[in-house]
Image (cartoon, rainbow, N blue to C red):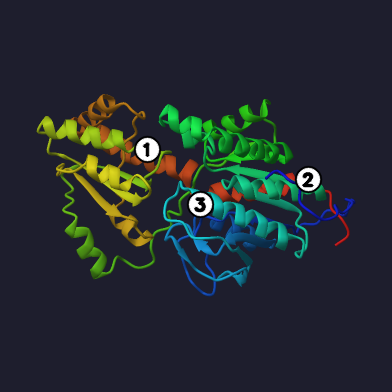
């Protein structure tokens, strides 16, 4: 399981710095814009677009299996071009139905082995950014990068494998002890091979640094999950307007909206319990909109059964997101009472609510605008590559 990659390590040699880099982005769980298919881009996709527009040669390693839709997009290893013109390489792996299951672990092992087989046939990059998870793929990429003296950044997207045992019974933790131990060994190997770590939050970055037993350096940075807030060029069509109207949302109510994945990383249960508490208080001004999908969706729907102030919308495209986007409130995870009090405070103070709405827009512009975040992330990759520039005869 922890065997090194086969093949000969090529000697590294200095070369004259260039303004153009060859960049590998390795992320297998996001939608990919291949064969003319326009899709809503996430973190890796938006970063790839910015690097490509800056003149860099981008290769995005993804997967033939669509993690979001749980369907196969292609059969076997596939080489494609994005809508913008950069290269996308899709690695084969088996299908799975749940985000945490044995078949997904098999899929990740297959992706890692496929990468090992195909990476040798590609021109080596100047810098590599690899999302974690998958741990197995991240490990194989780390072996490749270390062997060839290539700057390597691990982008921590989730707290694998620790998240597997959170809230689990003692019997499950005991049964999973060996797999978790092996995954942790691979993870630690990948982190040690990395030039630096990036993460979506301070807590995630600190988690990675704690695994390594070191403090942060200039190569370690937090880049939050950004969103493209560019207004739509055309207004919502009639179908979208009818869909929005069917939700029964009213401007005289306080809408608390969650958009994301229904999984172990986000505590949506607190929202539902707050909704239940408010309904018991006959506080009918509040509505909780939950948009997304994930392994915990069925359990959350069961928890919210009978609550008329909780609405599940399913996964939303950008047009529907923009149609609904008009509200927001912050709260501490697990603090149902605190969330209920915050909702009451906003409803009872319209001036405060208006101020918070304006502040939330300023906060988005400063810290969550994808164009700003991923331009900074691209700059970070450029600096990392330049500071640790080593390569071999191409």
- In the image, 214: left or right of 48? right
Helix, strand or loop at mark 3: helix
Q: Which residue is mark 3?
A: 104
Pick the front one: 5 or 388: 5
Q: Looking at the rendering, in which quadrant would you find the C terminus?
A: bottom right
Helix, strand or loop at mark 2: helix
Q: CA distance from mark 3 to mark 1?
A: 41 Å
Picture quarter containing residue 19?
bottom right
Helix, strand or loop at mark 1: helix
Q: Looking at the rendering, in which quadrant would you find the N terminus?
A: top right
The answer to which of marks 3 and 1 sits earlier in the sequence is: 3
- In the image, 17: left or right of 271? right
Q: Which residue is mark 1?
A: 359
| Badge nearest the viewer, 3 or 1 | 3
Pick the front one: 291 or 167: 167
Q: CA distance from mark 2 to mark 3?
A: 27 Å
Question: Residue 309: x percent and y percent?
Answer: 17, 43
Picture quarter containing residue 89?
bottom right
Q: Which residue is mark 2?
A: 146
Label 3 crowd (10 A; few <14 / some 14-19 / many >=20):
some
- In the image, 378: left or right of 70? right
Is 357 situated above or below 293? above
Question: Residue 200: x percent and y percent?
Answer: 53, 40
Pick the front one: 318 or 208: 208
At 78% from the left and 45% from the top, the residue drawn is 146
């Amino acid at each position: 399981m922890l065997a090194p990659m086969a093949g000969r390590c090529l000697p590294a040699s200095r070369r004259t710095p260039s303004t153009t880099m060859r960049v590998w982005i390795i992320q297998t769980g996001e939608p990919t814009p291949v064969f003319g298919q326009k899709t809503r881009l996430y973190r890796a996709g938006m970063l790839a677009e910015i690097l490509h527009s800056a003149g860099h040669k981008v290769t995005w390693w993804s997967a033939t299996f669509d993690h979001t839709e749980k369907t196969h997009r292609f059969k076997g290893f596939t080489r494609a071009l994005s809508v913008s013109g950069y290269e996308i390489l899709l690695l084969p792996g088996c299908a799975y139905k749940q985000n945490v299951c044995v078949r997904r672990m098999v899929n990740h092992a297959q992706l890692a082995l496929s990468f090992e087989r195909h990476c040798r046939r590609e021109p080596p990059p100047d810098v590599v950014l690899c999302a974690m998870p998958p741990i197995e793929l991240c490990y194989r990429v780390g072996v490749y990068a270390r062997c060839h003296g290539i700057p390597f950044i691990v982008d921590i997207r989730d707290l694998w494998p620790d998240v597997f045992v959170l809230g689990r019974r003692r019997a499950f933790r005991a049964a999973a002890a060996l797999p978790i131990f092996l995954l942790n060994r691979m993870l630690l190997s990948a982190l040690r091979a990395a030039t630096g770590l990036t993460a979506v939050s301070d807590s995630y970055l600190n988690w990675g640094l704690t695994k390594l037993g070191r403090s942060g350096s200039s190569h370690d940075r937090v880049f939050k999950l950004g969103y493209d807030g560019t207004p739509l060029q055309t207004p919502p069509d009639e179908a979208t307007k009818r869909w929005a109207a069917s939700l029964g949302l009213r401007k005289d109510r306080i809408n608390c909206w969650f958009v994301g994945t229904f999984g172990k990383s986000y505590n949506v249960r607190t929202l539902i319990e707050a909704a239940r508490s408010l309904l018991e208080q006959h506080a009918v001004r509040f509505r909780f909109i939950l948009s997304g999908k994930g392994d915990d969706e069925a359990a959350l729907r069961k928890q919210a059964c009978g609550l008329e102030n909780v609405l599940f919308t399913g996964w939303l495209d950008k047009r529907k997101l923009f149609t609904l986007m008009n509200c927001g409130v912050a709260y501490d995870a697990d603090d149902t009472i605190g969330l209920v009090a915050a909702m009451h405070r906003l409803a009872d103070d319209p001036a405060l609510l208006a101020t918070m709405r304006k502040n939330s827009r300023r906060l988005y512009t400063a810290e969550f605008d994808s164009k700003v975040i991923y331009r900074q992330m691209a700059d970070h990759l450029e600096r990392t590559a330049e500071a640790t520039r080593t390569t071999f005869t191409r």
